[in-house]
Amino acid sequence: MPDFKSLGISESIVNKLKSFGVAQPTPIQEKTIPIVLDGIDVIAQAQTGTGKTYAFILPILEKINPLVSHVQALIVTPTRELALQITEEFQKLTDDISGVDVLAVYGGQDVDKQLKKLKKNVQIVVGTPGRLLDHIGRGTVQLSEVSFLVLDEADQMLHIGFLNEVVDIIAETPTTRQTMLFSATMPEEIRTLANKHMRKPQYIQVEKTQGPAENVKLIAIHTIDRAKQATLIQLVETHRPYLAVIFCRTKRRVSKLYEVLKSHKFLCDELHGDLSQAKREQVMKRFREGEIQLLIATDVAARGLDVEGVTHVFNYDIPHDSESFVHRIGRTGRAGTKGLAITLYSSDDRPTLDMIEKELNIDIQKQNIGNTGSNQKDSQEPVKAKNNQGKKGEKQIGSSGTRRDSKPKASSRNSGKAKSVKSKQSISNQAGGRRDRKSSTTGSGKSRRSK
């Protein structure tokens, strides 16, 4: 298998990647990086979680000129959260490179603060369509000399309704630019966009839309609507996630479930489109740092959010289609770690579940909530938390500690230290453990938690 150096990445960046615990390129990186370094336009179709961010960040950093002060690279993303993530990855790789500055521009943030930064030498801009057009209209962002344009999560921008804005942004960039388009799916509108605005692009496809990664265990549990809340609470107590994302279909259902879980003293918070940007950033910061273990969210969190240590995904409401299922499940099992995804479904939901299985060619293990005892063959299946807490030989995924106690037990504080991405999985297998909410170094550069 080739390494990053053989793909054309400089030794200084390779060493920086190794310090993050990143030594081998993923398939999308392996196929995309050499093409981008050759100056060829790229259409890359790959699911979330395949490493596409480094597929465009690394070659851009190789080709950026720190001596030139104008905007050289523009990355357009559908959500503010994804813009912040990409910006953070750029900053981690350029923190010791003089002259390379990166700026995230997105709605909900203080415009004056962005304007002050834009007056400085910024070579890389990462932004959402609405705020980018706002700056273009103000004349505060000049894209006439952009060399690299990245359209990330293009199908999501189409889904949200940003396609016209994206076209307007493209019109502000020179036709000589190199364009990279990344998308999980390729709707006709995206193909049309690519054909019109890209120059003989090379098409790359990795892991076409299919079932979640093999390292993610899938379970579907039959319940009834009025028992959903109690079922979810039992499952959380049973599996004790290190970190978990709980998906609901609507903002209203997210808020309702959040109030219920909060009243039961779980460490949780909500994430949906009605929150202010400042609140959304605060929630994600707390989630990444382990101050909350349960993030109740709409599908706004299903795309692009890469949070280390998410061991579980709970589909409180079954998604409408197979694509949404894949992207929700993609929040766990990142970077080859193990994950568990549990979908709650009623009898009325069964046709949707069958459709998801058929389209993705997968077989999801079915259970009834009353048939999840620890005597079953797979030790990862739900068990009664109170009866099995701390049992020897128990192999529950993500059993890193109770969720309700506001104060950890003294003996739990020293139950283990997170040393790397791999060690996090072993941490999540220590029943009854808790963790302090302090950062320490991990394989991705910055740890969110330590025990």
Image: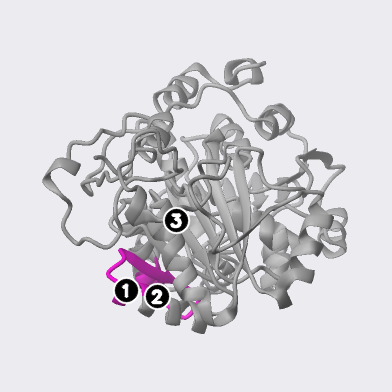
Q: Are circles 1 and 3 on residues that touch, CB within 8 Å?
A: no
* Residue 294 placement (x, y as % from top left): 39, 61
Residue 291 appears in which quarter of the rendering? bottom left
**350 relative to 422 in the view: left or right:** right
* Residue 99 placement (x, y as % from top left): 40, 37
Which mark is drawn over residue 262? Answer: 1
Name the image quarter holding the C terminus. Answer: top left
Task: Give the structural element (helix, strand or loop) at label 3.
Answer: strand
Q: Are circles 3 and 2 on residues that touch, CB within 8 Å?
A: no
Task: Give the structural element (helix, strand or loop) at label 2.
Answer: helix
Along the polypeptide, which appears first: circle 1 or circle 3?
3
Crowdedness near tag 3: few (<14), some (14–19) or many (≥20) residues, C-alpha within 10 Å: many
Residue occupying image coordinates x 38% and y 48%: 242
Circle 3 is placed at which residue position? 244
Residue occupying image coordinates x 38% and y 41%: 428
Circle 2 is placed at which residue position? 258
Please, what is the three-letter code of the amino acid marked with disc 2?
Tyr
CA distance for labels 3 and 2: 13 Å
Q: Are circles 2 and 1 on residues that touch, CB within 8 Å?
A: yes
Q: Which residues are magenta?
A: 261-280
